[in-house]
Image: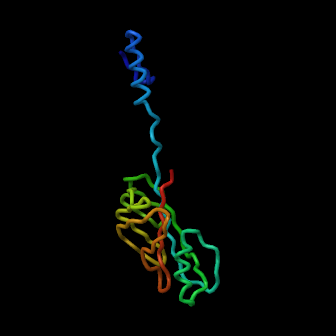
Amino acid sequence: MTANRDFNVLTVTAPAGFQTKVEEAIKEYDLQPVPARNIELTVYAVTGADAAAPVPKELEPIEKQFTAGGVYKGVRLTDTQVIRVRPGQPGESGSIRLRAAWVSAGDKNRVISFDGLKVNFKTATLSTDIDIPEGQAVVIGKAGTDGLLVAAAKVAE
């Protein structure tokens, strides 16, 4: 047997029975690499608004909470930032920095963990480690006097 790593070739000179076993082993272990996943974090700064306006789907539960008391008729986005990183890698984009992001299996959905998350918007600054269930928006802090910082995370495959 000889291997040529430059051309990714294995040459086998042997009886036919052995070559068949080599072919079976190659079929079993020579698999396509799993494409790298990306983790996408979106951080929104929202405030109460006097009029309803369309919001991203993941913010609809937050909007319901804002409007439940009758003080506001909707929410207004004052800032939105998105960052995309590979698991275990640091990242920086605009007003967001993080030391690393990880994906783990939760009870029903995946949970995405962010270590060393720093958000620096005009109305709010935040520094924390946080776990976010995939596809859910969670309040992560205050933004100004009547606003919130909301984060949503997903795995982009």
In the rendered image, the vertical position of residue 12 relative to residue 127, given as above or below: above
> Image point 42% across, 77% down: which residue?
141
Give percent across and percent down for residue 29: 40, 30
What residue is drawn where x is 58% and y is 78%?
Answer: 76
Q: Quadrant of the N terminus?
A: top left
**Residue farthest to the top?**
15
Q: Quadrant of residue 64?
A: bottom right
Vertical placement of 21 versus 52: above or below?
above
Q: Is residue 100 left or right of residue 136?
A: left
Tell which of 56 and 69 is nearer to you.
69
Residue drawn at (42%, 74%) of the image: 140
Q: Is residue 85 above or below residue 58?
A: above
* Residue 83 position within the rendered picture, expressed as x and y whole percent measured from the top left: 48, 60
In the depicted view, which residue is nearer to us: 39 or 105? 105
Query: What's the image's color scheme?
Result: rainbow
Q: How many marks?
A: 0
Q: Position of residue 112 (x, y in %)?
A: 41, 60
Residue at x 39% of width, y 60% of height: 106
Q: Can you tell which quarter of the image residue 5 is in?
A: top left
Give coordinates of residue 14: x percent, y percent: 37, 10
